[in-house]
Image (spheres, helix red, strand yellow):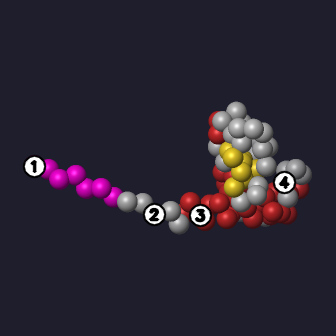
Amino acid sequence: MENTKVILGRITFNSEIMGGRACIRGMRITVALVLKLLASDMSIEEILREYPDLELGDIQASLNYASLLADEKVYSFEQKVA
């Protein structure tokens, strides 16, 4: 995993895995998938049963990563028309 960047101990980015999307521990399970499952009212227990390679810490890291992105500041640049 020499081209892999790791954040929060579990979230990995590698251009050769899932096109560089945020993944769980280098697996082909994206953070986006975990978040979509949670948003569709799937319980953590159901997710862990459906995806046995996942651990509770992976789901927690996915939520933590999402909260970091949601807290990002967005700057608006207004164009002045002459």
Q: How busy is the neighbourhood of tag 4: few (under 14 within 10 Å), some, or many (20 plus)?
A: some
Is the Cβ of the residue at disc 2 closer than 8 Å to that at disc 1? no
Q: CA distance from mark 3 to mark 2?
A: 10 Å
Say which label, 4 or 2, has the lower sequence index: 4
Q: Quadrant of residue 13?
A: top right
Is the Cβ of the residue at disc 3 closer than 8 Å to that at disc 2? no
* Residue sitting farthest toward the front: 2
Point out which mark residue 71 bears. none
Secondary structure state at the residue bearing disc 1: loop
Residue carrying label 2: 73
Say which label, 3 or 1, has the lower sequence index: 3
Q: Looking at this view, is 56 or 13 the one in front?
A: 13
Magenta region, main secondary structure: loop
Q: How busy is the neighbourhood of tag 1: few (under 14 within 10 Å), some, or many (20 plus)?
A: few
For badge 3, the amino acid type reads Leu
Residue carrying label 1: 82
For badge 2, the amino acid type reads Lys
Picture coordinates of residue 15, whole percent (x, y): 66, 36
- Point 88% across, 56% down: residue: 49
Residue carrying label 4: 54
Q: Looking at this view, is 8 or 36 the one in front?
A: 8
Residue carrying label 3: 68
- Point 71% across, 60% down: residue: 8
Is the Cβ of the residue at disc 4 closer than 8 Å to that at disc 1? no
- Point 22% across, 52% down: residue: 79
What range is drawn magenta here? 76-82
Secondary structure state at the residue bearing disc 4: loop
Q: CA distance from mark 4 to mark 3?
A: 21 Å
Membership of 78 in magenta stretch? yes
Picture coordinates of residue 71, whole percent (x, y): 53, 66
For badge 1, the amino acid type reads Ala
Q: CA distance from mark 3 to mark 1?
A: 38 Å
